[in-house]
């Protein structure tokens, strides 16, 4: 048996093929797993659990059917869907985890996180992240009419895309020191994250030995998951 990890599907009504691929993945692969962990950016954008977008109900139903079949499903917020709250968690049957979570799977300790907190060279992003993670600002935002929230989010998306065009690829990747600090803070030798859209399993040399950083791929033309069993940790890409 295996535990599956996915991230960065960026589901949206504009990408029906990715949604279809995800639903297929839930039925064909996740249904036979010990558990499913979704490490953020499941959705392209999230402006509140009260958004009546039919896609949200469709995904919640499919995830709930998975959990009802006995496959527990866990979620860590990404930088696009950090407003996913209790209502969606209840509707989908997912358990929302903190931004860093230590697991032990098949006797293997593993740190899981979205990955954006490791991108410490991206000072503008870290400043932005501190700002939008203020609970009072989120509560204020969620009190706005949905249309107004969508307009703000779309402006934020275009500001981000514009800002990203001026940033080097290195700045938008993880900072090696931040990675090493995360490994030592949790005294762990395995880490799984997403966010950077650079799928790979890296060996990291730490002062006390080797560690491994597994990075999930984003879902564009194919699916990407990390499959953990008692024997191995594998990065698997698969057709929708
Ligand atoms: O997302 P992506 O891949 O383009 O780039 C990310 C970082 N950008 C972001 C911003 C999101 O895309 C915006 C989506 C918002 C959706 C939900 C709205 C909820 C609003 C809640 C208000 C409380 O995450 C980008 C990184 C990149 O990853 C790589 O790591 O570089 O970071 C930036 O681009 C930061 C920019 O430098 C500044 C961000 C512009 C937005 C400023 C808005 C100010 C806050 C307004 C509060 C209402
Ligand atoms: Mn992300």
Image (tube, rainbow, N blue to C red):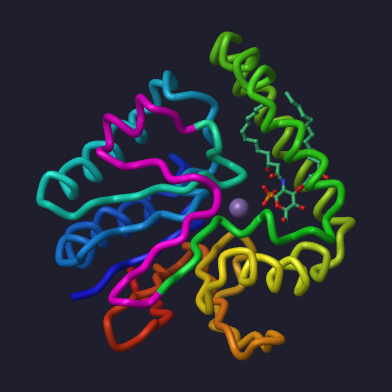
From the image, which quarter does the C terminus lie in?
bottom left
Residue 95 coordinates in the image, percent (x, y): 33, 42
- Judged left or right of residue 96, residue 94 is left
Picture layout, residue 219 above or below residue 1: above
The residue shown at (76%, 32%) is 131
Query: Which residue is nearer to you in this view: 24 or 182?
Result: 182
Picture layout, residue 163 above or below residue 34: above
- Judged left or right of residue 16, residue 191 is right
Q: Which residues are magenta?
A: 84-108
- Judged left or right of residue 26, residue 159 is right
The residue shown at (70%, 31%) is 132
The residue shown at (53%, 71%) is 191
From the image, which quarter does the N terminus lie in?
bottom left
Residue 63 coordinates in the image, percent (x, y): 25, 45
Q: Is residue 57 magenta?
A: no
Residue 164 coordinates in the image, percent (x, y): 80, 53
Q: Is residue 98 magenta?
A: yes
């Amino acid at each position: 048996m295996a535990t599956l990890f996915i991230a960065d599907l960026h589901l949206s009504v504009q990408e029906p093929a990715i949604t279809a691929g995800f639903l297929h993945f839930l039925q064909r692969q996740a249904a036979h797993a010990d558990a499913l962990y979704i490490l953020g950016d499941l959705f392209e954008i999230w402006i509140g659990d009260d958004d009546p977008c039919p896609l949200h109900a469709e995904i919640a139903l499919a995830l709930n059917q998975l959990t009802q079949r006995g496959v527990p499903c866990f979620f860590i917020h990404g930088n696009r869907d950090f407003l996913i709250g209790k209502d969606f968690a209840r509707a989908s049957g997912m358990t929302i985890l903190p931004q860093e979570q230590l697991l032990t799977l098949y006797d293997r300790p593993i740190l899981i996180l979205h990955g954006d907190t490791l991108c410490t060279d991206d000072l503008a992003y870290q400043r932005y992240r501190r700002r939008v993670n203020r609970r009072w600002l989120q509560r204020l935002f969620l009190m706005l009419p949905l249309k107004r929230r969508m307009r703000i989010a779309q402006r934020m998306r275009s500001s981000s895309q514009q800002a990203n065009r001026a940033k080097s690829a290195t700045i938008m990747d993880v900072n090696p020191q931040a990675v090493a600090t995360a490994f030592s803070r949790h005294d762990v030798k395995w880490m799984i994250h997403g966010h950077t859209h650079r799928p790979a399993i890296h060996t990291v040399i730490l002062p006390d030995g080797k560690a491994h950083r597994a990075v999930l791929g984003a879902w564009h033309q194919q699916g990407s998951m990390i499959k953990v069993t008692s024997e191995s940790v594998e990065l698997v890409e698969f057709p929708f």
